[in-house]
Amino acid sequence: MTAMYWLAVALGGAVGAMGRAGIAVALSTGAGFPWQTFVANVIGSVAIGLIWAALERVDAPPLWGAFLITGVLGGFTTFSAFSLETLLLFEQGAWQTAIWYVALSVLGCVVGAGLGVGLIRTLG
């Protein structure tokens, strides 16, 4: 990989992390269902579908994928936080909340990615 690739990933990661922090602040709810992570992951899944399909359609240079998908969305989505939050919900005995969180997150993110890809393919 070139220095430009790593720069694109790093800059994109900074943008994505700031977006993720913005969601955390905007949706700060305290205990209970981890809405901040859920919303970031669903938005990120819709975005990855849109971006991937759009980049594929225009045969974009690889640096765009490095910046947008690896960088921005890598910094924005929070699967590691999702995993820890799920574990903590189980440890706290909140089994029902944990199960709903996992089910809604997986379904929301897969559907979101599909919607993003479908939207781009429909527009062209």
Image (tube, rainbow, N blue to C red):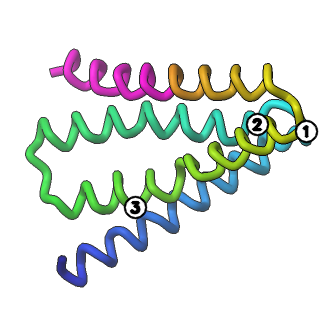
Measure the C-alpha gap from mark 1 to mark 3: 30 Å
Q: Nearer the viewer, mark 3 or mark 2?
A: 2
Q: Which residues are magenta?
A: 109-124
Foreground pick, 96 / 38: 96
> Most extreme residue toward the top, as rendered?
122
Which element type, helix, strand or loop, lies under badge 2? loop
Q: Amino acid at mark 1?
A: Ala
Q: Is residue 114 magenta?
A: yes
Q: Which mark is residue 34?
A: 2
Left or right: 15 in relation to 19? left
Can you say which quadrant of the picture contains the C terminus? Answer: top left
Rendered residue at 52%/26% (across/down) = 106
The residue where tag 1 is placed is 31
Q: Which mark is residue 71?
A: 3
Measure the C-alpha gap from mark 3 to mark 2: 23 Å
Looking at the rendering, which quadrant does residue 58 occupy? Answer: top left
User: How many other residues sit within 10 Å of disc 1, few (<14), some (14-19) or many (≥20)?
Assistant: few
Q: Position of residue 52 (x, y in %)?
A: 26, 40
Rendered residue at 24%/78% (across/down) = 4
